[in-house]
Amino acid sequence: MTKLTDLTIAEARAALEAGDTTAVALTEAHLAAVDAHEDLNAIITKTGERALEMARASDDRRKAGRRKAGRTRGALDGIPLAIKDLFCTEGVRTTAGSNILAPFVPPYESTVSANLWDAGAVMLGKANMDEFAMGSSNETSAFGGAVNPWTRAGDPETRLVPGGSSGGSAAAVAARLALGATGTDTGGSIRQPASFCGIVGLKPTYGRCSRWGIVAFASSLDQAGPMTRTVTDAALMLGAMAGHDPKDSTSAPVPVPDFAATVEQGIAGLTVGIPREYRPEEGLSPEIDAMWTRGMEMLRDAGARIVDISLPHTKVALATYYIIAPAEASSNLARYDGVRYGLRVVDEGDSLHDMYRKTRAAGFGTEVKRRILIGTYALSAGYYDAYYLKAQKVRSLIARDFRAAFDDGVDVILTPTTPSAAFPLGQEVTDPVTMYLNDVFTVPTSLAGLPGLSVPVALTGEGLPQGLQLIGRPFDEDTVLRAGRALEKAAAFTAKPTLLEG
Amino acid sequence: MDAPMDDTPAPAYVIRGDTGDWEVVIGLEVHAQVVSQAKLFSGASATFGGAPNSHVSLVDAAMPGMLPVINRVCVEQAVRTGLGLRAHINHRSVFARKNYFYADLPQGYQISQYELPVVGEGTVILDMPDGSSRAVGIERLHMEQDAGKSMHDQHPTKSFIDLNRAGVALMEIVSKPDMRSPEEAGAYLRKLRSILRYLGTCDGNMEEGSMRADVNVSVRPVGSTELRTRCEVKNVNSVRFVMQAIEVEAARHVEIWEAGREVTQETRLFDPGRGETRSMRGKEEAHDYRYFPDPDLLPLEFDDAFVEGIRATLPELPDDKKARFIQDFGLTPYDASVLVVDRREADFFEAVAQGSDGRRRDGKTAANWVISTLFGTLNKRGLGIDESPVSAENLGKLIDLIADDTISGRIAKDVYEIMVETGEAPDRIVEERGLKQVTDTGAIEAAIDAVMAANPDKVEQVRGGKEKLLGWFVGQVMKQTQGKANPGMVNELLRKKMGLLDA
């Protein structure tokens, strides 16, 4: 039988159902993997005891023939998962990858993680991430970045970044430390690390998953989603995570379809749009361009129609994103002031302002400070109209571009997920703009609030995984997942991370 | 039905300076705490009091990942208030974040409304003491969260924070700069408070801080229409202090302009003890609040049916009530405006004037008894109208006893005092104490005869033309009858007996 850690969620469910394994066995195997791969720094808080408790409860339920009562009827009963450390978990330290929250233990559980526990899932631990989800390499984490389990062919020594911000989640799933993980995506934070680590990552439609209990980065963009090794697993996990939450005013009161039930239905007759603006003037790397073309062929072979489309405002999306996201962040992060929870740095005789200054200086890293400064500037009197207001207008134009394509009959849009594969640790961290360019293909989707799925398609010449992105209509994740499944089948991506083979 | 309005300007409040006369231009921003069970964006209790930090939800404490959810009741209260201010209701409004750091502001921003408030322009009619009316424009009403409370006096080196108030719903009601005297500002505040209390949207308790005012003051030469630099006096918490603050702030401005200097725009604080305002922060230290639409909240949208549903539950408001009292009971505008300030007092008056049997009493008489006599009693004893020792029914009966000549006005005062002490019904008091007016001609004549017989010299003087002495005789006769004689009859019979009638 396959190693327990090599199972997909769907396979593990079947094995549990058939009595071939137990939740405890699955959980123990993954906890052992987490311990064995501490060098990846993917999990920053292990919750082994709680995991085993949850697994035992799952096994007891199964033995007694009982099912979880919630909406998902125990869809993930006994499935061990990693939770990005941006999701507040009751009684378990939640840091958002930041020193300022290093001592923070929430007395509440985020809606999305609570939904997963309701579905019977098991929490292995909290996954590493870029500080406050700001970063594309995991290197801004206050706990040191997670490491990509992949290395370049012929260069086993150079450690690569797993991408970010959900890099710990991506590394954990790729390295078989968890069957799946939650991520959050603000401008590409699920899709880019999924592509870098050779796994599947889905950013659902804005409003599909509740933001309640997720440490906020940019409220109008943040969205939780699944990170898994297969498209079907993503469908299963999304079904458990999603749902309307009255505690989040931006959560959409729409029903959650059974995504897993439709994922195999194929894409005959589907229209796939290819946006010409995703071939920037500076040129796309020939390798990625070729992979994109192969993706089109795969979808065409599966019965889809490929059409060229135009999304004219694509080139200003990145600039727009880097106004809106920092602006919201500058306000969202004001609450970390040392007054009520988290880090407090204060000396005898200090004023309130001294305490603010010292706490925030010590608590936030460079990238977070940079974005707070950018965002504060963009919202300041005299600059608001030129930056924030203009960015909002451009944002609506970007959304209109997508709407026009979908109105023209396009069902999904196919693009590369990232302009390059994973890069070495330390290579880009000194140049923020180069780092920001990682998001160039993912931010337009985020600004438009649309679902985006990254599916691993092939290895680059350097032997690194590379994903393609499928973008769909609002709340049409099932079509996106169906197309993703077709791509996955055709690509037959089976390569395993190099660090696992050693 | 609108109250009659006098378009002539109120008596000018003029500051006489060395260079000429100045007038003051006043606008008020009133923060009114919304009456609601829960806070604006959380389920925590919004009630006053409670142990520090006992009414605080995870949202109020701005814990990581917490999100605001609008409280429908607070929206209804804001719309209700807007309707009471005859204001335009915006069917779409937007919550915005006002960003600043303070220890009692957990989120690091206050959720407020900025560009699109829930209520637009409206009007408040002022009832001036001389009975005239003035209209003051309302610029807008928006909803926002209150902050918590910092306590700096609990510990030698630390400040304590109480978040009970943090997140409680406030309405900020902004007037246009339409007021021209401290009296008008006072009348505006009193009228606004009266309207809010009628609507049940704010309890109007300035002492408890559930209504606070920021006062914008500027001055200009009389006759000028320019608007000069204004100063904002923050957080004044009584009508009297608002009026005082305007007086001293306006005088300060005149002094500055007349000295050839410029008033600088700034935020000031009023110190009632010293009777002066002091600079709190200047323009250069003014916060840049970096307002932007709150991405955690959708725009607030509702339809006509929502507004009309609320309109249907509005009570009769002070202006309409006043007009009706003038119309139906023949009251003077002044009396009517005094009676309608408090809804329960107005109801009390109406119960007195209307009578439970549906028989209408003389409105002016009823108003006099309620305003001059009853309100005096309540004031003296520090009682509210709900605690009145005299019920509306009994006060009505007392008026009836005078009207049908059962007792005289003089005896009525005594009966009233007994009613205040005992709470008994006036007819019973009159019956038991034998205070019924004597209208028996024979009895009165006998008393007159006795007084005349005892004072022949005075009788002569009256007959000799000193009619003024007649009053003395009336008094003596009343004394003789323990005040029970009908004074009109005493007068008439005396004259007859003195030979002053048909002479």
Image (cartoon, coloured by chain):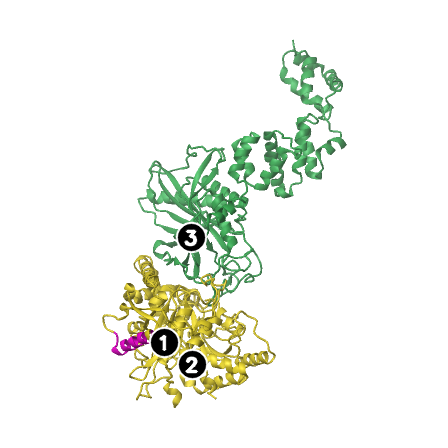
Chain colours: A yellow, B green
Looking at the rendered structure, the secondary structure element under dot 2 is helix
Residue beneath disc 3:
B93
Q: Residues within 10 Å of mark 3 (few under 14, many from 20)?
A: many
Letter of the chain that mark 3 sits on in the rendering: B
- Position of residue B128 relative to residue A117, above or below, is above
Closer to the camera in the image, A426 or A63: A63
Name the residue beneath numbered marker 1. A487
The amino acid type of the residue labelled 1 equals Leu
Residue type marked 2: Ala
Q: How many marks?
A: 3
Our reading of the magenta stretch's main secondary structure is helix
- Where's residue B68, x and y in %? 47, 61
Task: Provide the chain ID for the residue under circle 1.
Answer: A
User: Residue B417 versus residue B17: which sits nearer the camera?
Assistant: B417
Instruction: Identify the magenta region.
Output: A284-299
User: For numbered disc 1, what is the local secondary structure?
Assistant: helix
Residue A382 painted magenta = no
Residue A293 is inside the magenta segment: yes
Q: Does residue B339 appear to the left or right of A96 in the view shown?
A: right
Decide: is A315 above or below B312: below
